[in-house]
Amino acid sequence: MSGQRQPRMNDDLKALRDRLGTVSDLSSAANVLSWDQETYMPDGATAARAQQLATLRRLAHELFTAEETAVLLDRLSGTAGQSDDTTPEGALVRVTRRDFERERRIPSNLVAALAQESALAQQAWKKARHSNAHGSFASHLERLLDLTVQKAEAIGFDEHPYDALLDEYEPGMRTREVKAVFGDLRERLVPLVSQIAEGSQVDDGFLHRPYERSTQWEFGLAVLRDVGYDFERGRQDVSAHPFTTSFAISDVRITTRLDENFFPAGFFASLHEAGHALYEQGIDPEFDRTPLADGTSLGIHESQSRLWENMVGRSRPFWDHYFPRLRTVFPDALSDVDVEDFYRALNRVEPSLIRVEADEVTYNLHIMLRFEIELLLIEGGVSVPELPDVWNAKMEECMGLLPDSDAHGVLQDVHWSFAAFGYFPTYTLGNLMSAQLFNQAQHDVPNLTAQIAGGRFEELLRWLRRNVHRHGRARSAHEIMESTTGSTLSAEPWLAYVREKWGEIYDF
Amino acid sequence: MSGQRQPRMNDDLKALRDRLGTVSDLSSAANVLSWDQETYMPDGATAARAQQLATLRRLAHELFTAEETAVLLDRLSGTAGQSDDTTPEGALVRVTRRDFERERRIPSNLVAALAQESALAQQAWKKARHSNAHGSFASHLERLLDLTVQKAEAIGFDEHPYDALLDEYEPGMRTREVKAVFGDLRERLVPLVSQIAEGSQVDDGFLHRPYERSTQWEFGLAVLRDVGYDFERGRQDVSAHPFTTSFAISDVRITTRLDENFFPAGFFASLHEAGHALYEQGIDPEFDRTPLADGTSLGIHESQSRLWENMVGRSRPFWDHYFPRLRTVFPDALSDVDVEDFYRALNRVEPSLIRVEADEVTYNLHIMLRFEIELLLIEGGVSVPELPDVWNAKMEECMGLLPDSDAHGVLQDVHWSFAAFGYFPTYTLGNLMSAQLFNQAQHDVPNLTAQIAGGRFEELLRWLRRNVHRHGRARSAHEIMESTTGSTLSAEPWLAYVREKWGEIYDF
């Protein structure tokens, strides 16, 4: 009898992979359509595109949650067994079952409605931000919030409806845990911010001089090549809000935006997105067209982008290597600047209104504000029309700054326009993880600092490939942190990194 | 009882439209993926993209040819009846049934295989053309040809397997009819070409001077706006082979390619594709997401592109308006040229190797050559390895020229790389129709020539919208020609146009 089990299992596995492949192709197609919407699509196509995305997401959902998937998963669990969870097949069955249990609770028409309303809301958000009028976006946000609450209820939760949302982006993480980590972090971060405010001043005026766009673009592309982003399997375009998207392990694209009068905006957006893209380009090709071919959590994903953007890209050795070249291509802006000035300017700390322009130290305060507001929205403690006032009050409380407009306040981020509630906390989780992982890399890779100062990133990338990238979703965030660093999520390494780096810059 | 029939019909019609809408969304998504493949996709993504296209085309085909479609069509034919064919609903049922009868005969796996092999073959064709090696493309072409013959046999035919292929692009047209039209045309065209060859000489050397790319691009965009191409519902990009594609009536895109050393290449590619795009942008928006939202035949489609490219864009009044501006933006190339020189140069007739660079007069000889070769391929009279030799022999026979390479010979066109056998003849049909339609427009629109000389195209566009564009597939090519011009397809108006225009230029 056991002789017959193997062929049956192989047939079932093949049938499952075929089905998942079709679902993956539909999702990839939807991702191409979304990428196009953000980069090249003409405005008049908004309604048609929303309809197309709704159809693709609905069909993918229907195919994935069909009874046939359950039957195959049951048969494969029976034969492969949970015991064999460490094989790629075992991981595939486990991760697919997890997604299946979650997805099958969400009705298809809710999936379609969310896709359609999101595509419409994104265009509305762009217009509202441009004309600085939260009112014109409010009705879209109300519909999305309503659909999101329906989704959380459909999925179900033990403690808090936000758990059901958070779990999509950070599998297994609870709202309660995020509250605890954030509470602890805030308590120790706020005094640090005060110490920095009392420290010596840092001048970054020269970063706001004119930096010609096409030169910025070329400089950025050269660095992307150096860090190992593979342009045979990706490309960079311009969009309003930088992002990374994947259509296959062989097609992982990034976008950036350039600010003629602030060099770091475009450069670090590129490097940040390249960090995400290196992760997705590094997944085991065997996982292509399956649920394993994705980042295992947004926290881990963000740890990769922040590691490259901050630990590498805002470090002194990195600019020891690149600053001479940068000064050569931007002589007007930088002839009177040396690498030490430049490094300090890049790391200037100052409370600010805009998350994506925030320094590393105050950045997490922006995230905590959004997390608090999302909880209020989901719990019904704040209505959409009250949102701008609540935002502004909280901003004044935590940063001591009052937004002069909705565009610089509640409308600044794209996330809510695609109903990504539960997404923001993963940014801070990723920051914390990036410090843990980079510490370990420095321990494991001899002379890493010297390598970075020489513009050599192969060994770091290889270390990340081996410990993080190649596993895709076959290892959970928790497993990756434990197996790589020997410890679980912790704020201490990131706080130590802040104390050391900014203690030196601000001399405290 | 008749009181109950109406609601039932409305429910059935709604169900049919929903189903066709889903199919249309899948096809549109596939078109976005193909557009991306030709414009921005990184090379490494080829295999993944081929798989994604196969999945989308297969699912669209399965949904469209499902039994439910037949049931709805039967019920709607029963109630709406053929008698009511002139209503939009009647046309929808008629056209959908036509497609259904054709598509249901093609197995889904053949649809998927054709989509996948085509996507792979297109990349192989690009490489083969680049490296001038037909051999590396031959195995792809053999597979596509084999699948195409399978498709023709699956669809069925009365007279010739080529009928089954031609019918996809020119519904209702038979191979026999094309042979008759082409035979008649060739007989009268060849003496004309000889007369022109004996006429006075035309110098076009200044067209080959350097024309800066970005200036070409801007000049082209300005003319596209003038002729009425709507950039709110479209955009222009660069690709190796210019094309028009539609993702919705609100998203019709064109591509072009620029040649720094030959101004007409990019400009007329743009204007040609804009002619196609004006057609698709002008379809009744009520038809969106149904089979009616498409050109009614490729002949009619090509009549629109050629009308704008040739009848308008290569005319003397058009350049009376635009030449002064062109000379202003390209002073180095054109300061010693006047509008008469320019007009004559644009219309220089000379036998040539490359179809897309051919003048209007000899262009149709290129098409006849391809038609003959396609018949041989489908009949099995020529094998793929023999193709370069057969091509070269026929080229020498009809043009008196021998290609110096496969890139300038059998590999020059993209069409066979996506298995578009039966497509080429529609180019010549479109040329003939364009003359018939433009004659009628000149009759119906007072002072059309003066309007063109003033850079005003609204009335011409309105005339085309009314007589051709808005009907989409609700009227057949035959019906459009009859209702608009009062006659059916004929070569005589085009031959008269050639005799008049080139008689004047070449003084015969």
Image (spheres, coloured by chain):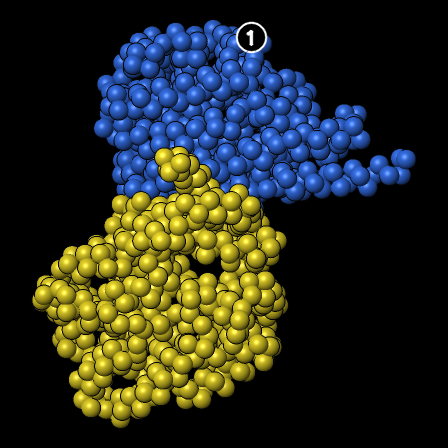
Chain colours: A blue, B yellow
Residue B206 versus residue B420 in the image, above or below: below
Residue B57 drawn at (x, y percent) = 52, 50
Asked if residue A175 can be seen in this view, the reply is yes
Residue located beneath label 1 in the image? A159
Question: In terms of image quadrants, where is residue B238?
Answer: bottom left
For the point 71% across and 42% down, the residue is A14
Residue B358 drawn at (x, y percent) = 34, 76
In this picture, residue A37 sits left or right of residue A422: left
Question: In terms of image quadrants, where is residue A399?
Answer: top left
- Chain to which the residue tagged by mark 1 belongs: A
Question: In terms of image quadrants, where is residue A492?
Answer: top right
- In terms of depth relative to the viewer, which is nearer, A205 or B40? B40
- In terms of depth relative to the viewer, which is nearer, B256 or A21? A21
List the single residue furthest toward the front: B1
Residue B421 versus residue B276 in the image, above or below: below
- In terms of depth relative to the viewer, which is nearer, A305 or B345? B345
